[in-house]
Amino acid sequence: MKYAVRYYTKTGNTKKLAEAIAKELGVEAQPISVPLEEKADILFLGNSYYAFTIDPEVRTFVSSLDKEKVGKIVNFGSAAMLNSTYKKVKAEADKAGIAMDEKEFHCKGEFKGIHKGRPNAEDLKAAAEFAGQFKDQ
């Protein structure tokens, strides 16, 4: 199984989750500005809500993916107010012809004093454990 981890973050919260996931999988977490050139059976994609939707850069990244190189996308992220970005990312993945796993990881993220300190050590451990369930699928 080959894994890749890409993320988009404005506050650094999703980067922390990406690094915990990548460490568990033995790969490097990279921002979505780094193109996915290698084949990945599973691409872990980290993102969050900004102004009640996913950032246009995330949409552009997903649309740029080569469906021959990506087996499926696993969504993860953090947010202060809204929870899952799954439906928004899945809509983009569907357009690109790439499958999305039904499972995703989400936790609270600190933003302007809300959910101070999140993601915390427990959140990072939970993210790593989440990624671990995909090993050798």
Image: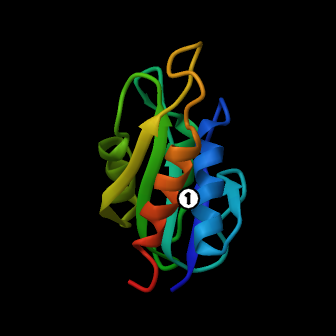
Question: Is the C terminus in the top left, top right, bottom left or bottom right quadrant?
Answer: bottom left
* Residue 48 image position (x, y, % from top left): 49, 36
Q: Nearer the viewer, residue 45 or 16?
A: 16
Q: Nearer the viewer, residue 17 or 129?
A: 129
In this rendering, the answer to whether 100 lies above or below 115 is below
Dot 1 lies on which element? helix
Outermost residue to the front: 122
Number of residue marks: 1
- Whether residue 37 sits left or right of residue 131 in the image: it is right
Q: Nearer the viewer, residue 105 or 62?
A: 105
- Whether residue 45 sits left or right of residue 15 in the image: it is left
* Residue 46 image position (x, y, % from top left): 53, 49
- Whether residue 79 sits left or right of residue 60 in the image: it is left
* Residue 121 image position (x, y, % from top left): 58, 44
Q: Nearer the viewer, residue 72 or 28?
A: 28
Residue found 50% across the figure and 45% down from its top: 123
Q: How is the image coloured?
A: rainbow
Residue found 65% across the figure and 45% down from its top: 15
* Residue 116 image position (x, y, % from top left): 57, 21
Residue found 71% across the figure and 66% down from its top: 28
For disc 1, the marked residue is 64
In this rendering, the answer to whether 127 lies above or below 108 is below
Amino acid on which the number 1 mark rests in the picture = Ser
Residue found 40% across the figure and 51% down from its top: 105
In the figure, residue 30 lies in which quadrant?
bottom right
Residues packed near mark 1 inside 10 Å, few (<14), some (14 to 19) or many (20 plus): few
In this rendering, the answer to whether 14 lies above or below 45 is above
